[in-house]
């Protein structure tokens, strides 16, 4: 099918759109822009393949230059050969560009579960992937306009425009909730205050259980320090965070 983009900002006259033909592709029925208007992702929007398209795991990244030209920057298939041989093939259920426009987050459904794959918006290279039992949705946390400048991408040579995400490294991930981390910090701080109160009474006046609790002070302080660092990271305004919605919450 021929895919075209219509621009109303650079038309020949007011209200007349300019048509830009991107080329002919297989099934492509979903387009997602980044917040800067510098990139967009073209893909298939289908339910786990469902026999609709054998390209339900494919994406194409396009560069939208400031002067108005549009060129295909890279293409990638999100699944490996083993996954594509299944009766129900893997498919992309959602994509979202990071606030700085440098990373594309893709949610993938496959026969073995679900994955989040992080793709370089520059060349389509796989950065890493996270495995889950299921994913209902994944979006980057929004930031105020103007937080990041518009990205600038060099146009890659033709031989660099095709890639695959199948070789991406798998990272084991622990989901962190900011409120839960804060509650754990307060709990550890209360334990530390209790230990200090016991030590102020003198170790010789404590029973066996109280002495064991007092001896745990180094372990408690170490755990508190790690939690405080984690809480500080989650509070940093320049961190690019994404939220994952599962059956157990966000």
Image: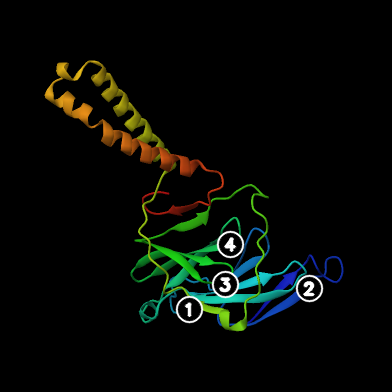
In the depicted structure, whether residue 153 falls above or below residue 163: above
The mark found on residue 18 in the picture is 2
Label 2 residue SS: strand
Observer-side mark, 4 or 2, equals: 4
Nearer the N terminus, badge 1 or badge 2? 2
Which residue position is annotated with label 1? Answer: 52
* The quarter of the displayed image where residue 136 is located: bottom left
Observer-side mark, 1 or 2, equals: 2
Residue 24, given in percent of the width and then of the height, sits at 63, 84
Instruction: Write the residue at 26% across / 17% down.
Output: 200
* The quarter of the displayed image where residue 51 is located: bottom left
Which residue position is annotated with label 3? Answer: 123
Cα–Cα span, label 3 and label 2: 27 Å
Crowd band around label 1 with a 10 angstrom C-alpha radius: few (<14), some (14–19), many (20+): few
The answer to whether marks 3 and 2 mark residues whose Cβ atoms lie closer than 8 Å is no
Q: Quadrant of the N terminus?
A: bottom right
């Amino acid at each position: 099918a021929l895919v075209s983009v219509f621009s109303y900002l650079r038309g020949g006259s007011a209200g007349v759109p300019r048509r830009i033909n991107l080329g002919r592709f297989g099934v492509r029925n979903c387009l997602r822009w980044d917040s800067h208007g510098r990139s967009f992702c073209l893909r298939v929007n289908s339910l786990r393949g469902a026999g609709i398209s054998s390209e339900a795991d494919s994406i194409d990244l396009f560069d939208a230059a400031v002067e108005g030209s549009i060129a295909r920057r890279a293409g990638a298939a999100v699944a490996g050969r083993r996954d594509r041989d299944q009766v129900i093939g893997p498919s992309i259920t959602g994509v979202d560009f990071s606030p700085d426009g440098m990373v594309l987050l893709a949610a993938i459904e496959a026969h073995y579960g679900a994955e989040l794959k992080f793709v370089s918006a520059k060349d389509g290279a796989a950065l890493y992937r996270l495995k889950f039992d299921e994913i209902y949705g994944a979006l980057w946390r929004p930031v105020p306009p103007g937080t990041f400048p518009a990205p600038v991408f060099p146009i890659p040579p033709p031989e660099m425009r095709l890639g695959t995400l199948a070789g991406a490294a798998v990272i084991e991930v622990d989901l962190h909730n900011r409120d839960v981390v804060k509650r754990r910090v307060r709990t550890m701080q209360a334990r530390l205050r209790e230990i200090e109160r016991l030590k102020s009474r003198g170790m010789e006046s404590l029973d066996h259980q109280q002495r064991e609790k007092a001896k745990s002070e180094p372990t408690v302080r170490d755990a508190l320090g790690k939690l405080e660092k984690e809480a500080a990271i989650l509070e940093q305004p320049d961190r690019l965070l994404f939220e994952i919605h599962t059956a157990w919450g966000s």
